[in-house]
Amino acid sequence: MSLNRKRKKELRKLQVQANNLWESQQVLVSEAANVAREATRQLGHLNREHVIPGVQAGYSKYAAPYVDKSMQFSKQVLADRVVPTAGAVVGSALSVWDAANDTRARLASGGGLSMPDSAKYAKLADKYGAQTTKKLAQKLTVLDPPKQGIGAGGVIAIILGVAAAVGVLYAAWQTLRADDELWVADDPLRAPDA
């Protein structure tokens, strides 16, 4: 099928218009990318200047006292209840071990079986328990770790920053997506051969 000159001229004109539209769309996309980069940069500034200090202030005002109280309470329970109990258990176990060793030594020497001296082993159990409690308490005071990394406020600030960035990107995407009909295919329009 052959096209007359008028149709060929109209098709070439349409092709030029499509190429111009394509170029303007490319400019629009690059400007949208620049706007998104600038929005990300401004979001970072906003995050550093307003969000993070606000979250840190809120954390220190509302959550930090409860976290500190719970840490003090757990340290107190550990120092006053767990360590002495563990020391008593270890001391009792060691005194039983000593009683077993004494009995084994008596049997090996031919002394036979006799009732162990309970007062002696109770004294040993108290001694071993006190020693173990002292050692555990010393190790626990050394184990207080220094604070490292970001706290709960930092995590909350990061989450808020990511949510804001996603919101900006979604708005940019919706803006660009709304002009679906203006986009031109990657293949340039060609006029049919005459």
Image (tube, rainbow, N blue to C red):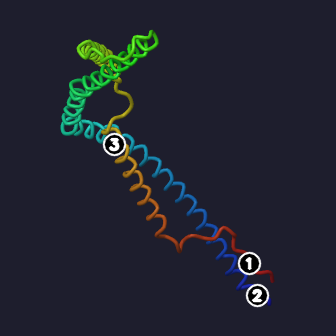
Q: Gap in Å between the C-alphas at discs 3 and 2?
A: 65 Å
Q: Name the residue under label 2.
A: 3
- Circles 3 and 1, Cβ within 8 Å, touching? The answer is no
**Pointer 3 residue:** 157
- Camera-side mark, 3 or 1: 3
Looking at the image, residue 3 sits to the left or right of residue 68; the answer is right
Pick the front one: 47 or 80: 80
User: What residue is disc 1 on?
Assistant: 191
Amino acid type at circle 2 is: Leu
Residue 95 image offset from top left, x and y in percent: 33, 18
How crowded pointer 2 is (Cα within 10 Å; few <14, some 14-19, many 20+) is rated as: few
Quadrant occupied by the C terminus: bottom right
Query: Quick one: SS at disc 1?
Result: loop
- Say if mark 2 contacts mark 1, CB within 8 Å: yes
Which amino acid lies under the numbered mark 1 shown in the image of this protein? Ala
> Few, some or many C-alpha atoms within 10 Å of disc 1 (few <14, some 14-19, many ≥20)?
some
Task: Give the amino acid at mark 3.
Answer: Ala
